[in-house]
Image (spheres, grey):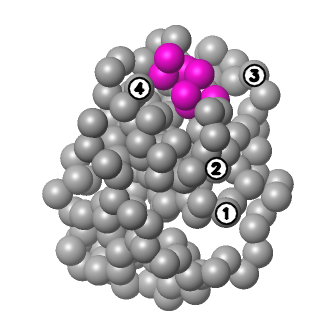
Amino acid sequence: MKKPRSRTTLPPRQSDNDHRRLDSAPDPARIQWLLGHARYRGRGKHKGSPAAFGLEPEPKGDATLCDDHAGFLPDAAPSIPRLLTRGISAGLIGPGARMLWTVGDDGWIFEARITNSEQSEYHGYPVRQTEAIAEKVYQRFVAWAAAHGGAADQQAATLCQQLYGFRT
């Protein structure tokens, strides 16, 4: 098993949204609907080099950056639909599906926030180790990976545990 990349220094968040939470029991019909409709559309705000992703630059503020902080580079972009499917299948869905989460193959947790509800489009970004939602996402994901996931999902759970320092 390969060791996860060490975390880079992330900018401090101006505020941690304690209202982010997982839906306690996502409706299976909602999961099926999201699997068929949810789509990713990137935003320059969450890229250190937005042009490399074909995106326009945006002010960064305290945003976490996919490329600079999580090492998620343009050549990994084709994996985004699979990662979105992974998170939805694992029930990593917030109330009303305004937020979704997934765990990358390297262990990083990514949050996807609705950008265009009419088109079911989400943009995503890495979740900091210190954010309250991270361990909750990990706990649900590791349980799903053990019960329903494949080898890649189980490895992602292990790498997530190591990267974020969660206790088993």
- At 24% from the left and 79% from the top, the residue drawn is 51
Instruction: Find the distance from the CA under tag 1 to the CA under tag 2.
Output: 8 Å
Mark whose residue sits in front, 1 or 3: 1
The stretch in magenta equals 140-146
Q: Is disc 2 surrounded by few (<14), some (14 to 19) or many (20+) residues within 10 Å?
A: many
Which quadrant of the view contains residue 52? bottom left
Circle 3: residue type: Ala
Circle 4: residue type: Gln
Left or right of 142 on screen, residue 47:
left
SS under mark 1? loop
Which quadrant is the N terminus positioned in? top left
Looking at this view, is 106 or 33 the one in front? 106
Residue 25: image tag: 3
SS under mark 2? helix
| Among the two numbered marks 2 and 3 on one chain, the one whose residue lies closer to the N terminus | 3
Residue 154: image tag: 4
Q: Residue furthest top?
A: 147
Label 2 near label 1: C-beta < 8 Å?
yes
